Amino acid sequence: MEIITKYREWFEYERDCNNKMLSMLESVPGANRQDERFQRAVTLADHLVACREKWLDIMLGGDGGETSWRNENCEISTLRPRYSKMETTWTQYLSSMEETHLAEQFKFFEFDGEQYSLAREIQIAQLMGHALYHRGQIALLVDQLGGAVEDTDYVDWWWYNMRASTDT
């Protein structure tokens, strides 16, 4: 199996996790949404979508756009539409990508003003791991705030969604 096929599969898993993460945030009781931990969880969810938006723009030759890496005042109501748009864009990007494109380098500027170069595959893998890390933080905050935490384990997603296509 080509690795690009695996990245496409992993992004479908990530889309499922994003939906569950947003449902978790939405499940936090209204009385607990004034707690600073709720805004921290919403800010982390905003950070995840911002990273996907900005890095795709950069990999396509842009400068990352106007979106902030982290919006401390993000409203939960803005997240679902942003995730939907980002997921559509990323699905299109990955579906049109050829295996050979993974090794292609792209250039970007870091906070220090220096220009760097990185292979697309490295950034795609980074974004996947980055999302796992922050979704775990969000799940913990949601649990502490009395919200409903959902299972986002890959093996469970795979068993339900991919097993039938791999059984012989």
Image: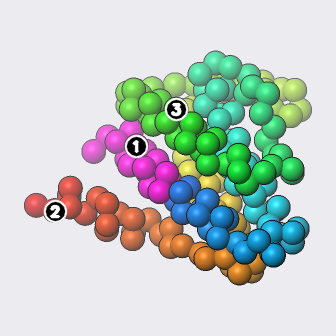
- Amino acid at pointer 1: Arg
**Alpha-carbon distance for marks 3 and 1?**
13 Å
Can you tell which of label 3 and label 1 is closer to the viewer? 3
Can you tell which of label 3 and label 2 is closer to the viewer? 3
The answer to which image quadrant residue 107 occupies is top right
Q: Are marks 3 and 2 in contact (CB under 8 Å)?
A: no
Front in this rendered view, residue 72 or 95:
72
- Is residue 130 in the magenta section? no
Q: Which residue is mark 1?
A: 8
Q: Position of residue 13 (x, y in %)?
A: 44, 55
Quick one: quadrant of the C terminus?
A: bottom left
- Is residue 14 in the magenta section? yes
| Residue at the image position 75 percent from the left and 78 percent from the top | 145
Front in this rendered view, residue 110 or 157:
157
Q: What element does badge 3 sit on?
A: helix
Q: Considering only order in the chain, which callout, 2 or 3, is on the residue closer to the N terminus?
A: 3
Front in this rendered view, residue 79 or 140:
79
- With respect to residue 98, does 41 lie above or below? below
* Secondary structure, magenta segment, majority class: helix
Q: Considering only order in the chain, which callout, 1 or 3, is on the residue closer to the N terminus?
A: 1
What colour scheme does the image use?
rainbow
Q: Position of residue 161 (x, y in %)?
A: 31, 60
Q: What element does badge 1 sit on?
A: helix
On residue 167, the disc is 2
Classify mark 2: residues with Cα within 10 Å, few (<14), some (14-19) or many (20+).
few
The answer to which image quadrant residue 27 occupies is bottom right
Residues rendered magenta in the picture: 1-16
Q: Is residue 73 left or right of residue 48?
A: right
Q: Which residue is mark 3?
A: 89
Name the outermost residue toward the top. 61
On residue 93, the disc is none
